[in-house]
Image (spheres, helix red, strand yellow):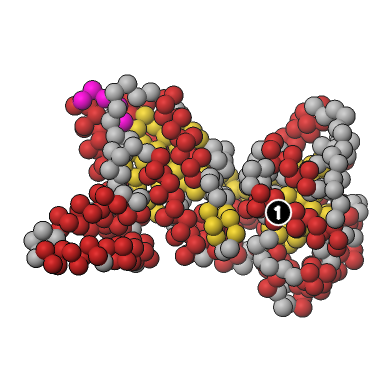
Amino acid sequence: MVRTGQEHGAGIAARLRARHWPQSLVLIAAAGLATHWFGLAALLLALPAALLALALWERRHPRPLTDEAARGAAMHRAIAHGLSTARQGGARTACLLLQIDDFDTLTDRHGLAAADRVILQSLERLARTLRPADQLFDLGAGRLGVLLASMPGLTLGPLLALAERLRTALAEPIPLDAATHHISSSIGLCLDAQAPARTATALYDASLAALHEARRNGPSAIRAYGRGMAAPMPLPRALADEVSEALAEGRLITWFQPQICTDTGQISGFEALARWQHPTAGLIAPAEFLPLLAASGRMEVLGDAMLANALRALQTWDHLSLDIPRVGLNLSPEELRNPTLPEKFAWELDRCDLPAHRLVIEVLETVVATSADDVITRNIAALARMGCPIDLDDYGTGHASIATIRRFAVQRLKIDRSYVTAIDRDPDQQRMVGAILSMADRLGLATLAEGVETAGEHAMLAQLGCAHVQGFGIARPMPLAATPDWIAAHRAKLGPVPRIARAKG
């Protein structure tokens, strides 16, 4: 039966999560044989409520044996046993690691209870997809592990097909906060024959390296281990000091992600994004180093560097006659609280001889929805009067009212990725985005959809009337030096684009 890799006491709750009711009954009945049959009958009558409470209590109050380190150790023990069994029978096994994309963001936006429901439902869906003898592990922080039972003649082809089925199972919508939520997952896998050595550590680490590669190419990517792949090195403890040093030395770089018009396919702008190429840990995600900079009060220093790099990019594109209309720049709450922010932006724009309308100011919806700070309001209004367009970023996550949108002189809504995922297949997503687009149209606001990953999502957004799109399905963020070639290649494949008819009202 599918097991979560916990000790026996937790195994019953795990089988409950996977909805293996008959096996759970057998285990509990066996545990109660030493009692009088009346006691056993009472136990079975109380089974549903008791086991549900146990499952939920375990996940909210983990014991030492259920923390992340112990869960990983339990999977290592299972892999060692699985390798031994496969070797004795002349069969093969494999390890798969699945990471729910943006799990930290999901937890921040919807809370621990909602994240808990996502994990429980994900475990159940994976359990229904796997064979009874396969083992399933909750490794914590949105990561799940699968160890396949030994199978004669197992090859990479069927393993990749299984990974695709697991990814599809997790992609089914999950109800959260009175709405459906789509999750995606990145998957790394390794066949035991492909691991660097026939040990549990080697097989797990190879799968982890493949998962790291999948996440670099994600979301929703699948990668099999290959030679040359390496698991990410642990981040140094002194990372806060390192990121401040990297910032001071100019080693935090700016990458750019294109935005395109759904009517014509033409490039309507780029967004500037911070990246840190660590000398040993590799490319570190902004979610890991931005909080460190915020905690050390260095966000304004980063903001100054990002502003300079964004304006330099515009100058570079102008020098190459590439006709890029504008670049978007994210402003943190720390930057927005600086009373001299408008003057600084005006000075930098004048120094670079660039008009203000080419620098888009992106402000998180969560910032404007919760801000009662008069300085923030004043600064955004001043930038808007200067001529900088104001984008409301991650729209749909911060509950900004229409009054708030007007108060902050917003000109464009950037629809959050959570509303875009699977919009070509999910009528609920279509209705939600349709409502946002209708409101934006009536308020005279432009729209841009973030996180577009497929041609189907792109086409549906265009049909619904979303004016601009951005996401991995269009292009990944890239260094400034790579943008001219991408721009040339994109424009070379554009032909006459028919306008998509849109219904009004």
Q: What are the residue bounds of the magenta stretch? A: 89-93
| Residue occupying image coordinates x 29% and y 66% | 50
Name above or below for residue 424 compared with residue 7. Answer: above
Corner quadrant of residue 446: bottom right
Residue drawn at 66 percent across, 51 percent down? 429
Residue 24 coordinates in the image, percent (x, y): 25, 53
**Against 471, is 392 above or below?**
below
Q: Secondary structure at mark 1?
A: helix
Residue 136: within the magenta?
Answer: no
Closer to the camera in the image, 215 or 449: 449
The front one of 252 and 65 is: 65
- The residue under the point 37% across, 39% down is 130
Magenta segment's dominant SS is: loop
Q: Is residue 256 above or below residue 494?
A: below
Residue at x 44% of width, y 24% of height: 157
Q: Check the picture and name the quadrant holding the C terminus.
A: bottom right
Q: How far across and down, in percent of the image, does residue 308 sit?
A: 77, 53
Q: Quadrant of residue 293?
A: bottom right
Identify the amino acid type marked 1: Arg
Q: Does the magenta run of residues contain 91?
A: yes
Q: In this rendering, does residue 249 appear at all?
A: no
Q: Is residue 227 left or right of residue 341?
A: left
The answer to whether 36 appears left or right of 256 in the picture is left
Mark 1 closeness class: few <14, some 14–19, many ≥20 residues within 10 Å = some
Q: Which residue is mark 1?
A: 431
The percent coordinates of residue 58 (x first, y second) are 32, 63
Drawn side of residue 452 relative to residue 138, left or right: right
| Near-viewer residue (214 or 503) | 503
In this rendered view, identify the residue nearer to me: 348 or 129. Answer: 129
Q: Which quadrant would residue 197 be assigned to in this image?
A: top left
- Left or right: 79 in relation to 241: left
